[in-house]
Amino acid sequence: MMLADILTIILLLGGAFFFLAGTIGLLRFPDVYTRLHALTKADNVGLGLIVTGLAIQAQSWAAAGKLILIWLLVLLAGAGVSYLIANGALARGVAFWKR
Amino acid sequence: MSMLFFYALIGVGLFTLGLLALVVQPHLLQKILALNVMGSGVFLLLVALGGRSQPVVDVVPQAMVITGIVVAVSATAMALTLMLNLSRSSPGAQLPEDQSADS
Amino acid sequence: MQNLYIILALFLLLNLLAGMWRILKGPAAADRMLASQLFGTTAVAILLLLAQIESLMALRDVALVFALLAAITAIAFVRRNWPQEPDDAG
Amino acid sequence: MEAVGLWQSAFDLMLGFSLFGLAWRMLFCADLFKSIVLFITFGLLMAIAWVRLEAPDVALAEATIGAGLTGALLMSAFAKLRTLDNSLKSGQPLLPRPRLHVINFWIALLFTVLLTGGLAYAVLSLPSHSPGLSDAVMSQLDSSGVTHPVTAVLLNFRGYDTLLEMAVLLLSIQSVWSMAGMSDAGEVHTSPVLNVLIQLLSPVLILVSAYLLWVGAHAPGGAFQAGSILGAAGVLLVLSGRPLFNLKKSWLIRLMLVAGPAAFIALATLTLINEGQLLKYPVANAANYILLLETLATVSIGTTLLALFVGSQTEAVQQDQSHQ
């Protein structure tokens, strides 16, 4: 097994872990804002790690570039949408969680 | 190989589930969603059965399904317009038959 | 490697199904929207893994399209279904 | 690699049952907004199912339409519905139980179960191997002008399908306009973050649309997918509040709507006269004809989808003054 393969395995498992963390956060966190926080972990880090892991295996620079582009697009859309939803929830008076 | 038949059966299930909802559910938006699910069931059946020609998958059903998806979305837009127009004249977005069953 | 890819894809699919609970329970519309946003990202990851398994690079285009269009539904939700300015709703 | 097959089967089983379960929860739940979100998720899973069924072209079409346009359409229509019907508020169970008589419900259920059984029997009695038309497609692929079989079927072998499909799209926009009227797709208020998002996304969308159109000649992609992306780009601009165009006045829009069908009909007539058969291109020029048709079809499909989105939400023509 080559070094690249080992690196890929580590990165993919890390990505899967962050997706799991995001899902658990989505299910367990108490209000919209904290769930938003959990969601971005899967969006940004989880997909980022998986994309990096797969890019190592890619046949060409162009293929790796496309993978990175996909990740950047998800980042961009995720950031924008997160802001819009949080802002909208705030404007609409969705309650904060209080201990 | 048997996976194709599994997907085909799921397609059958989606079609009949959608049919049941189309008949039973009163709200027109639900009926529109039901029609879409029925369509998805048919598409799934077509493509799954087209996959039986191994090693090369039969692409004619796939081409038909691509056409079908675009037609389905335009039909959905039209149905939604109809629904909105109907709910302007009578509240509830339901067909007259369903409303009279209430009284 | 192939085994790892498909197991991870299955794992992500299970993740997605677990997240379905949030859509079913809500409570707010925003919660449901958030969950569907997460599903979009998960679907991108699943598609990329499947692309690697079947070495079918066209599937990356599908993932690309998903990444591009994931925002549209959420924007439609925020702009139309859930207007930011309360007096603007008409 | 026995284990891989096993895991793949597990994936397929999981996916299939979730599709069915999702459809069930979507269609039999009392909250319309929940149904819509579940429908969007259903579209996501369908796209993954197409991938598993070795139909990347269909996956691409499902992704462009299911992930973007249908969701936006349903969301907007539901918002409009809520302004018309005060009882609809998301988050609370709001729909009445099925109003059918209980006997009728059981009759419907019985018939559905019987139909499912019959259809399942019919499907299972099919032979497990059937060549279909794949041999015919593959043997003629060289003379089609493209190397991707799906595009060859859509634009050459069964070009009349696509011709009729363009006609259906044109009809649908006509009926939407006749029911709801045309309006300018303009709202004025914008949000700065959304503006930046749109400014970054829309050029990429148009670029990807062109890419899919071009790649369709030899790989999954083509006019339908490219057109849907173009339509999605327009929907994004409309949603962000750009006064994109004025449908009442613009002849350009009407021209773009009919460009695809018109080109198809013109070429169909030409080939009928010259070759004696509908849409039978001379082999030497087939690639050029297909590219021309696909480009115009992309423009028309994109414009139609955008106009459908805008048109389906405008006020009805006659009732503008009588209500509110």
Image: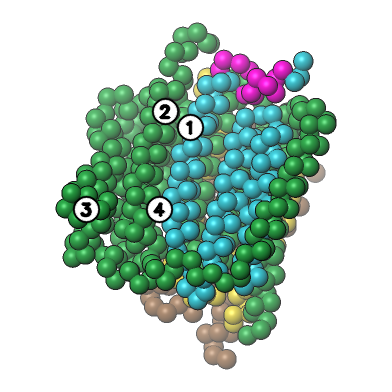
* Chain coloured yellow here: C
Both on one chain, marks 4 and 3? yes
Which segment did they paint magenta?
B88-100
Q: Amino acid at mark 1?
A: Met
Whether pointer 1 and pointer 4 mark residues with C-beta atoms closer than 8 Å, the reply is no
Magenta stretch encompasses residue D175: no
The secondary element bearing badge 1 is classed as: helix
Task: Check disc 2 and report the residue beneath it.
Answer: D175
The disc at residue D169 is: none
Image quarter in which the C terminus of chain B is found: top right
Q: Which residue is mark 1?
A: B78
Q: Amino acid at mark 2?
A: Ser
User: Percent x, y for residue C4?
Assistant: 63, 78
The 10 Å Cα crowd at callout 4, few under 14, some 14 to 19, many 20 or more, is many
Residue to which mark 3 is pinned: D276
Residue at left 56%, top 81%?
A: A7
Tell me the kind of residue under disc 4.
Gln
Task: Quickly name the residue at label 4.
Answer: D225
**Local SS, label 3:** loop
Disc 3 versus disc 2: distance between alpha carbons?
Answer: 34 Å
Label 3 vs label 2, nearer the camera: 3
- For the residues bearing labels 1 and 3, Cβ distance under 8 angstroms: no
**Colour of chain A as rendered:** brown
At 52% from the left and 48% from the top, the residue drawn is D66
Question: Label 1 vs label 3: CA separation?
Answer: 37 Å
Q: Residues within 10 Å of mark 2 (few under 14, many from 20)?
A: some
For marks 1 and 4, give the one nearer the viewer: 1
- Give the x, y percent position of residue D17: 71, 58
Q: Which chain is green?
A: D
- Is label 1 in contact with label 2 (beta carbons under 8 Å)? yes
What is the spatial separation of the Cα atoms under label 1 and label 4, in whole angstroms?
20 Å
